[in-house]
Amino acid sequence: MMGDKPDEGIAKCFSPHLGTYLLSHSVGLPLRDAEQAAAAAFWQPWQSGNRDIWSHWLKEIDGFRAQLATLLNGDLDSFCPQTSLSSAVAKIIDSLTLDKAKNTILLSEEDFPSIAFALQKAGAGGYRLKFIPAQADTSELNVWADHMTADVGMVLVTHVQSNNGRQLPVQKITELSRSKGIISLVDIAQSIAILPIDLQAWSADFVVGSCVKWVGGGPGAAFMWVRPEIIARCEPQNVGWFSHADPFEFDIHQFKYADNALRFWGGTPSVYPYVVAAHSLQFINSTGVDVIRAHNLLLCDKIIEALSPTQLVSPADVQSRSGTVIIHFGDHQETLVTRLQAQQVHFDSRAKGIRLSPHLCNSSQQIEALIGLLK
Ligand SMILES: Cc1ncc(COP(=O)(O)O)c(C=O)c1O
């Protein structure tokens, strides 16, 4: 069990690295045995002489979907592998029939730019983006209610906004959008594996995410979740044989959409990223997000308690906090950056400040040493 004394057994699960690794909001640390586990899952058909390679690989990818279904409380059929969040978003927009009276997509200036770029260009540019200004408090439901005007047909909700480290009340926002007949699309890139997520409790229509950050599952294993009740309305334009109800039918004159989220898949998929990610997801599921979050909060609390309130940029309140603490030391910021770098603290720096994301690979001793450097 995690506590003030870090569980050394768990800490040893991660790849060795020099220094204090606090970059799980960017690229999470892989598991020590990731390469070995993925090699076994990927190369097995050749090593064993198995001639039915696709059956083996598709079973492995189903394993990835099943781990997601467990982690996020959704059913396997509603998950479709994707290469990145933005490409998933573009496919979603292109799958929907444009209603000219409701062609506004509501989002926030604090969302991740990649997603806004996809929203701008998809749908043959037929949508208008309406941004909630960066200064607004997006954790307030009233802010969303005020912006959900009659022309809004879709809303993008980023569960954790990476610029400010803020956690948004997704359930409330998606309930509100559902009550107004607005389609909701939720980005969980920064929250999967660090915040509890229950897709059955949300009223979301689409959810997009990836495994490169807190999951520690490497790049390339993104995914989308589609609410079962909306699948029949979606006609993806970017399709391939794996979007077909029976990919191995091979009748060139008959395309038939898969009746589940796999209609969003496409042509021959990559396999390797999903076997890497499935292994990490299995570790996250067997450890429990509640354990990961408790350890993260314990270490973040230590950092926050050592700061003056003006140095903390991300929220202090636990309900609004993500896994990332963002700090800014005003005129001393540059000096601090140099000092942390010199002591092998791995972090990044954005417009609002230094971002620090404690995960299971970090111990209390590491955080106490970090606090020593902040003083
Ligand atoms: C909130 C959020 N969404 C999306 C992404 C990445 O999107 P994509 O998979 O399109 O690169 C990031 C990456 O940092 C992010 O922080």
Image (cartoon, grey):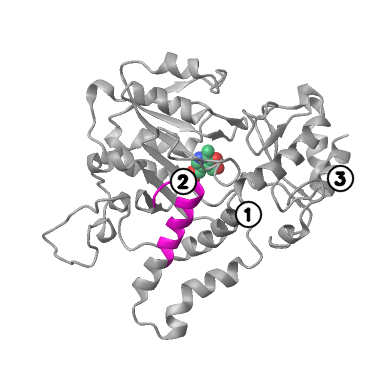
Which residues fall within the magenta stretch? 60-75
User: Which residue appears at 65% of the width and 39% of the height?
Assistant: 323
Q: Quadrant of the C terminus?
A: top right
Q: Looking at numbered disc 3 in the image, what kind of residue is underneath it?
A: Ala
What label sits on residue 247 in the rendered view? Answer: none
Task: Identify which residue is drawn at 58% across, 31% down.
Answer: 167
Q: Amino acid at mark 1?
A: Thr
Horizontal arrangement in the rendering, residue 351 relative to residue 299 (left or right): left
Label number found at residue 73: 2
Residue 185 x/y as whole percent: 40, 35
Q: Is the residue marked by circle 3 packed among few (<14), some (14-19), or many (20+) residues within 10 Å?
A: few
CA gap, disc 2 and disc 1: 16 Å
In the displayed structure image, the side of residue 232 where residue 49 appears, left or right: right
Inspect the image, locate mark 2, and give the three-letter code of the amino acid beneath it: Asn
**Residue 196 appearing in the image:** yes
Residue 58, image x and y in percent? 37, 66
Quickly name the residue at label 3.
Answer: 369
Residue 80 versus residue 167 in the image, above or below: below
Helix, strand or loop at mark 1: helix
User: Residue 195, image x and y in percent?
Assistant: 58, 40
Inter-mark Cα distance, 3 to 1 = 26 Å
- Crowding near the residue tagged with mark 1, few <14, some 14–19, many ≥20 C-alpha atoms within 10 Å: some
Magenta span dominant secondary structure: helix
The residue mark sitting in front, 3 or 2, is 2
How many numbered callouts? Answer: 3
* Farthest residue, direction bottom: 49
Along the line of sight, the residue nearer the viewer: 355 or 36: 36
Residue shown at the point (23%, 42%) measured from the top left: 232
